[in-house]
Image (spheres, rainbow, N blue to C red):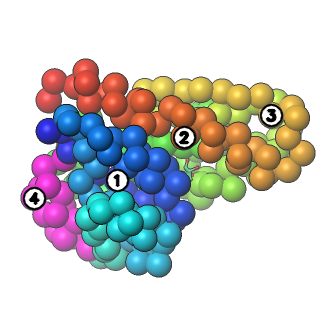
Amino acid sequence: MKNIVIFASGTGSNAENIIHYFKNNYSKSVVAVFSNNSNAKVIQKAKNLNVQTVIFNKQELSGDFVLSKLIDINPDLIVLAGFLLKFPEHIIQEFPNKIINIHPALLPKYGGKGMYGNHVHQAVMDNKETETGITIHFVNEHYDEGGIIFQKSVSITDCSCIEDISKKVHQLEQEFFPLIIDQLLSTNSN
Ligand code: GAR
C-alpha cells in the first residue's frame, strides 16, 4: 500500500477530492491530513471521510513534532493542497522527491511568498492575463520553485471577476490533481 499524506490550511476542497479519488483504491490511500489550523474546514472534511487528522502549530512544524509523526507514517507522497506555511527544510531533506504542491497559476508567474489563493487570481486579473492555470511541482526550500511536474492552462478572456477565475482554476485542480498523484505513485519506484 502506498501512503499519501495531505497538508492543508483552509477549505480543503482539494484534500476532499483526493481522499474521494483514492477511497476504493487497493494500492494507494490517503492516511492522514495534517493542518496548522484547527478551525480549518479541511479538518471536518477529513474526519467525515474517516481520515486521521494531525493538528500542529508553527513551532511543531519547525521542530520535531511534525517530522516524527511523518516518520511514523512513512509516506510515499506528501501532498500540499492549499498549505499556506513555508514547508521546513529539515522535512524536505528527510523526504527527497516525495513532496509536491499545487499552485493556482502558471509558474514561474505569480509564485512566491504571499502568492496564494485569491491573491494570485487578483494579480492575474490586474495584469489582464488572457489565460491562467495550475502548476503541480516538487517542493524545495524556495516558495514555488521546485521542479515542475505538470501544468494545465485555461482561457480567462470570459472572466469578469476573480471569482470567475478561481472557479476555472478549481475545476482544473479537481480534474487533474488526483490523476497526477496517481501517476506519480505508479511510476515512482521508491
Ligand atoms: C487551491 O486553489 C490551491 O491551488 C491554493 O490554495 C487553494 C486551496 O483550496 N494554493 C496556493 O495558493 C498555494 N500557494 P482548497 O483548500 O479548497 O483545496
The CA span between labels 1 and 4 is 15 Å
Residue 63 in the magenta stretch? The answer is yes
Q: Amino acid at mark 1?
A: Ile
The circle drawn on residue 174 is 2
Quadrant showing the N terminus? top left
Any mark on residue 72, and which? 4
Report the disc number at residue 6.
1
* Numbered disc 4: secondary structure: helix
At label 2, which amino acid type do we have? Answer: Gln
Q: Which badge, 4 or 2, comes first in the chain's sequence? A: 4
Q: Main secondary structure of the magenta part?
A: helix
Asked whether the residues under the numbered discs 2 and 1 touch, taking CB atoms below 8 Å apart as contact, a structural biologist would say no
Q: How many numbered marks appear?
A: 4
Quadrant containing the C terminus in the rendered view: top left
Asked whether 54 falls inside the magenta stretch, the response is: no
Residue, x 44% and y 64% (percent of image)? 45
Pick the residue in front: 32 or 149: 32
Q: CA distance from mark 2 to mark 3?
A: 18 Å
Determine whether 38 is above or below 148 in the image: below
Few, some or many residues within 10 Å of mark 1 (<14, 14–19, 20+)? many
Mark 2 residue CB less than 8 A from any atom of ligand 1: no
Residue 48 percent across, percent down from the top left: 38, 66
The residue that mark 3 highlights is 156
- Between residues 59 and 188, which one lies in front from this camera angle? 188
Mark 4 vs mark 2, foreground winner is 2
Residue type at numbered disc 3: Ile
3D distance between C-alphas at marks 4 and 2: 29 Å
| Local crowd size for mark 3, using a 10 Å CA cut-off: few (<14), some (14–19), many (≥20) | many
